[in-house]
Image: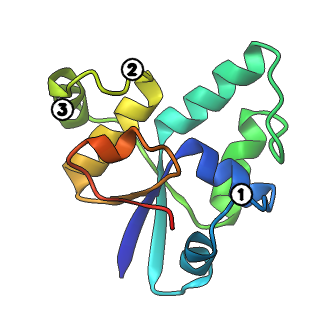
Amino acid sequence: MVKYLLDTHTAVWLFSDSKKLSSKVRGIFTDRETALAISIASAWEIAIKISKGGSIPGVNGVALFMDKLHENGIEVLNITFEEIKIIESLPLIHRDPFDRAIIATAMSQELTIISVDKNIRKYEVSCIWY
């Protein structure tokens, strides 16, 4: 079974059935031979955006976001000390702390990130979109 790590926007677009999702990514979501995971950093990012008055399509609060992850069988991965050590050593290509946590999680657990973010591809981590 192949396991992928979702970037925050990827999960949001999945839940809102966004046209922004590539056909390759849609195929991954429907393939029964794949397992999906997401970093708890994504829930933290959603909570901060909502607390600042932001609107997130298909997500009306962090509790609903977590419910949707559970309903879709997406495993939520906690941030470990191993990831924190990796974050400390990452070059400052990407300054977003949530994306840096996602990158570190992918590195420590040898996962492929599903993301449109081109800055993630600048790290030595597997990342797909198209």
The answer for how far apart the CA atoms under marks 2 and 3 are is 14 Å
Q: Earlier in the sequence, mark 1 or mark 3?
A: 1
In the picture, measured across the screen, residue 115 lies left or right of residue 17, that is left
The amino acid sitting under disc 1 is Lys
Q: Residue at x 57, y 70 (%)?
A: 25
Label ID, residue 48 = none
Comparing labels 1 and 3, the label whose residue is closer to the camera = 1
Q: Residue at x 74, y 38 (%)?
A: 63
The answer for how far apart the CA atoms under marks 1 and 3 are is 30 Å
Report x, y in % for residue 44: 57, 28
Q: Nearer the viewer, residue 67 or 57?
A: 57
10 Å neighbourhood of mark 2: few (<14), some, or many (≥20)?
few
Label ID, residue 20 = 1
Comparing labels 2 and 3, the label whose residue is closer to the camera = 2
Report x, y in % for residue 117: 49, 44
Q: Earlier in the sequence, mark 2 or mark 1?
A: 1
The amino acid sitting under disc 2 is Arg
Q: Residue at x 41, y 64 (%)?
A: 4
> Considering the numbered disc 3 on the image, is that residue within a helix, a strand or a loop?
helix
Q: Quadrant of residue 56?
A: top right
Report x, y in % for residue 124: 20, 47
Where 45 falls versus 110 (above or below)?
A: above
Where 109 falls versus 96 (above or below)?
A: below
> Considering the numbered disc 2 on the image, is that residue within a helix, a strand or a loop?
loop
Is disc 2 in contact with disc 1, using a CB cutoff of under 8 Å?
no
Q: What residue is shown with label 2?
A: 95
